[in-house]
Every structure is written in structure tokens, then in C-alpha cells.
Amino acid sequence: MSQLDSPTKPMYLHTIWGRRPMNTMQRLLALLIPWAETKLLNFIKKYEVRYRDFWDDGLRLTVPLGNKTPLRALADLATLMEIEGLDKDWEFVSYVLTDTPDEFDPVTCVRD
């Protein structure tokens, strides 16, 4: 169920992050030494964030809402990413609220 037709309170926040633009030298160096991916994997293990999809220039992370509002959960996730230095490699694109961690409909993405 998507956030638009769900009768219950959403339980999960799916966030879409895009890779920050890099110059040619940075892209070549990233192919040899994948620092951004290493930092991301360490972040996922440390904070137990659900890692969903990864593609060339983006990724999807899922976090449970618990008792937080969606914007508070998003702010907390962004703060943790900044603390770990991931804000230099990834930037926020959009989010989706769902009832289960596995469902995701990109059509209902909220873009900020």
C-alpha cells in the first residue's frame, strides 16, 4: 500500500539519495578506491539502516519511523549521514512512506 491509499499510519520511510556530481579525476579515483561505498556499508552496519537498492548514481535506504514524524526521521537520518561523512558523497532526492519495509512505489515519491 502506498501512502496515498493506506488506512493505517505508515511505518517505514524509504529515502532516495543521489550521488553528488564528481569531476573526471574523482570518478576515476572512485573506481580504484571505493571510499563512498565503504563508508556507506559501514554506516548501514553501524546504524542498522535497511539498504534496499543501489544503482550507478543513487541508492535507496529504508528506516522504521517508530514514534517519529516522517520529517523528523528524515532529519535524523540526514544528521547521521552527515556525522559519518556521507553527505559529501550523497544528496537527498525524495522519500516515500509505506506500511512494510519491502513495498515501494516510485510514483508516490515526495520530492523536496
Image (spheres, rainbow, N blue to C red):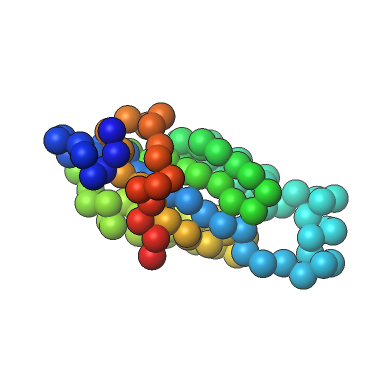
> Where does the image place residue 4, in percent across and percent down from the top left?
23, 44
> Where does the image place residue 106, in percent across and percent down from the top left?
43, 45
All told, the count of numbered labels is: 0
Q: Quadrant of residue 25?
A: bottom right
Can you name the residue that lies furthest to the bottom here?
23
Camera-side residue of 46 and 22: 22
Q: Residue at x 48, y 51 (%)?
A: 16
Q: Residue at x 63, y 49 (%)?
A: 39
Classify the position of the N terminus by image quarter. Answer: top left
Can you name the residue that lies furthest to the left here?
7
Q: From the viewer's perspective, is residue 58 above or below residue 27?
A: above
Left or right: 82 as drawn, with respect to 72: right
Q: Residue at x 56, y 57 (%)?
A: 18
Q: Is residue 66 visible?
A: no
> Where does the image place residue 59, in percent across and percent down from the top left?
56, 47
Q: Is residue 91 visible?
A: yes
Classify the position of the C terminus by image quarter. Answer: bottom left
Q: From the viewer's perspective, is residue 109 above or below residue 93?
A: above
Left or right: 98 as drawn, with respect to 55: left
Q: Quadrant of residue 20?
A: bottom right
> Where does the image place residue 87, in percent across and percent down from the top left?
54, 62
Q: Residue at x 26, y 37 (%)?
A: 11
